Amino acid sequence: MALSDDIIDRKIAEFVNASNDAQKLTKLFIREREGVYQFGSKRVFVKMEGDKVFIRVGGGFLTLDEFLRINVPIELEKMAQRDPISVLSKNIAVNSIIAGRAVNQRETNKITPLNYNSALAFSRETMQ
């Protein structure tokens, strides 16, 4: 919901609401103060020129549309990587791999070196 007295906030809200991914974009844009937003993991500075919204990038500006086209996929990937379910799944997968290696290592540790006595005992067991 946009602040009614902030033209930039209203324009961003209009743009977000008109997009195909309004839910995702709403999560990415958090207003800090007039002209300053947290966009995912970035703090962005926003200005209006005429009827267009511009986002400061480096030493210049991109239109809101250009900025979102470049940065939405990056920020959504970052959000997905921080998602607790995703983090838990990765940890489980890593632990399974580590546990599998530990099991395999333990199995190889069970192999005893072949010497005369163990060979003699083995041959006696197989003959019976």
Image (cartoon, rainbow, N blue to C red):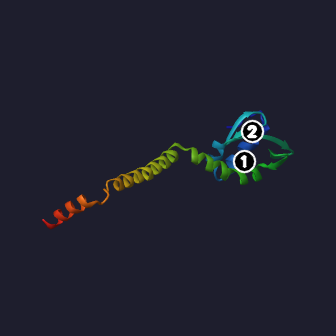
Residue behind mark 1: 15
Q: Earlier in the sequence, mark 1 or mark 2?
A: 2
Q: Secondary structure at mark 2?
A: helix
The residue depicted at 66 percent of the width and 53 percent of the height is 73
Residue behind mark 2: 9
Q: Percent from the top left, x then y, of residue 91?
A: 48, 46
Q: Percent from the top left, x then y, of residue 116?
A: 25, 61
Q: Nearer the viewer, residue 82 or 121?
A: 121
The residue depicted at 40 percent of the width and 53 percent of the height is 100
Q: Percent from the top left, x then y, of residue 34?
A: 78, 33
The quarter of the rendered structure image containing the C terminus is bottom left
Q: Is residue 127 above or below residue 113?
A: below
Name the outermost residue toward the right. 50
Disc 2 marks a residue whose amino acid type is: Asp
Disc 1 marks a residue whose amino acid type is: Phe
The residue depicted at 67 percent of the width and 47 percent of the height is 17
